[in-house]
Amino acid sequence: MNLITRKGKIKGKKLGEKLHSKEKKRRRRKTTQVEKWIGFGAVEEAKAGKRSLLSSFSLRSEQQRKEKKERKSGYSDSNE
């Protein structure tokens, strides 16, 4: 049985390695950082060689933070 750390990572298992069904169930609800990046579309950008994975992810999250702020304040400076 592998130890699961508080952050939900499994000690002793590498990314992409097969998991036991119990571990799968326990792990199912948690998305890994890479899975989040895939959701952001940062992986595609990195594969295209535009940026590194981490920088493209931080750019995306920054963009989304700005958009959220604009939505809350009710205006956006992009349509000036």
Image (cartoon, rainbow, N blue to C red):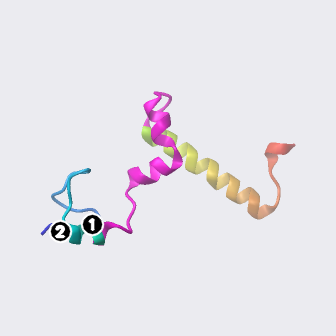
Whole-percent x and y of residue 55?
48, 40
Residue at 23% from the left image edge and 62% from the top image edge? 10
- Above or below 58: residue 33: below
Residue 41 percent coordinates (x, y): 52, 44
The label on residue 3 is 2
Residue 2, by quadrant, is: bottom left
Q: Is residue 55 above or below residue 33?
A: above
Q: Which mark is residue 16?
A: none
Mark with earlier residue (2, 1): 2
> Which residue is at 26% across, 50% downward?
16
Q: Position of residue 14 (x, y in %)?
A: 21, 51
Q: Are marks 2 and 1 in contact (CB under 8 Å)?
A: no
Residue situated furthest top in the rendering: 49
- Quickly name the residue at label 1: 24
The residue range painted magenta reads 26-52
Query: Quadrant location of the C terminus?
Result: top right
What is the spatial separation of the Cα atoms under label 2 and label 1, in whole angstroms? 13 Å
